């Protein structure tokens, strides 16, 4: 299997795509968003391209669904049936970064959650979490849900202003590695992301 990293998060809009773009660039990896739900405001594949991931490194989505909601519902609204067998990890040369949708217990179909898919894939998962209020609960819930399904967790990637105690509390109680913390980048562009990612994360953690 290719060296694969799966990016999930404690919620939607948490910074998974920004982190995934940074990791993809740091590893010269390929990027894959298996199911894109919501097309009007652009796609995550489009957003990683804007953040400097070469178009040739972005694999096509297996499903592109119109409505910005959970894939199980977005597919029904489009009259599309998601076939889990079409969501097998693609083989690529080099590393692969895969981004889920929303959080770990978002339904892909009415009988398959993202966390179940992660368990089938067996690749290490990075949990992206905000540093702000509420993150301890959301992070520990996510860790428990993944562990219950025997999903390998690589560690936590925090996004936002430093909250040392929250970050340490999550990693201690959850027994997970703290991979690093990306601050809010202003501006957020290909250059600041590349530099910020290199400063805040250690490539050895993704070896
Ligand atoms: N480190 C950061 N610095 C500046 N802006 C950020 C950072 N991380 C995320 N953002 C901004 O926050 C918003 C949400 O980020 P992002 O699209 O990465 O979330 P997501 O978790 O991938 O969402 P979704 O569940 O829709 O896939 C975007 O507008 C993004 O540009
Ligand atoms: Mg995203």
Image (cartoon, rainbow, N blue to C red):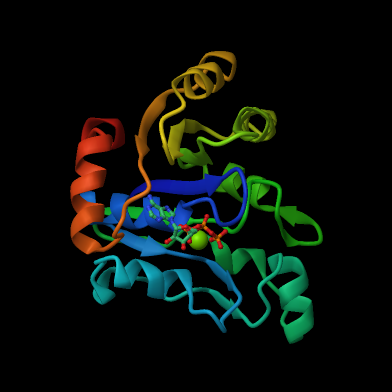
Location of residue 78 (image quadrant): bottom right
- Residue 77 vs 164, above or below: the answer is below
Position of residue 75 in the picture relative to residue 120 (left or right): right
Position of residue 196 in the picture relative to residue 142 (left or right): left
Residue ID at (44%, 37%): 158
Residue ID at (50%, 18%): 165
Q: Position of residue 127 (x, y in %)?
A: 51, 39
Location of residue 193 (image quadrant): bottom left
All told, the count of numbered labels is 0
Q: Is residue 27 visible?
A: no
- Residue 44 vs 28, above or below: the answer is below
Q: Nearer the viewer, residue 143 or 52?
A: 52
Q: Is residue 47 visible?
A: yes
Q: Position of residue 159 (x, y in %)?
A: 43, 42
Q: Nearer the viewer, residue 4 or 206?
A: 206
Q: Position of residue 154 (x, y in %)?
A: 44, 32
Question: Where, quadrant-wise, is the C terminus in this rendering?
Answer: top left
């Amino acid at each position: 299997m290719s060296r694969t990293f799966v990016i999930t998060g404690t919620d939607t809009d948490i910074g998974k795509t920004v982190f995934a773009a940074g990791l993809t660039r740091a590893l010269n990896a390929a990027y894959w968003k298996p199911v894109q739900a919501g097309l009007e405001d652009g796609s995550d594949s489009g957003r990683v391209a804007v953040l400097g991931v070469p178009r040739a490194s972005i694999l096509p989505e297996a499903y592109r669904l119109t409505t910005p909601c959970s894939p199980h519902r977005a597919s029904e609204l489009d009259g599309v049936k998601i076939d889990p067998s079409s969501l097998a990890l693609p083989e690529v040369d080099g590393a692969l970064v895969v981004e889920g949708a929303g959080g770990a217990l978002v339904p892909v179909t009415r009988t398959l959650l993202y966390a179940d898919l992660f368990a089938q894939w067996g690749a290490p998962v990075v949990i992206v979490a905000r540093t702000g209020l509420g993150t301890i609960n959301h992070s520990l819930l996510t860790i428990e849900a993944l562990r219950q399904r025997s999903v390998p967790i690589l560690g936590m990637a925090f996004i936002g202003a430093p909250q040392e105690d929250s970050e340490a509390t999550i990693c201690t109680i959850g027994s997970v590695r703290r991979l690093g913390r990306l601050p809010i980048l202003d501006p957020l562009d290909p250059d600041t992301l590349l530099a910020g990612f290199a400063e805040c994360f250690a490539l050895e953690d993704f070896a």
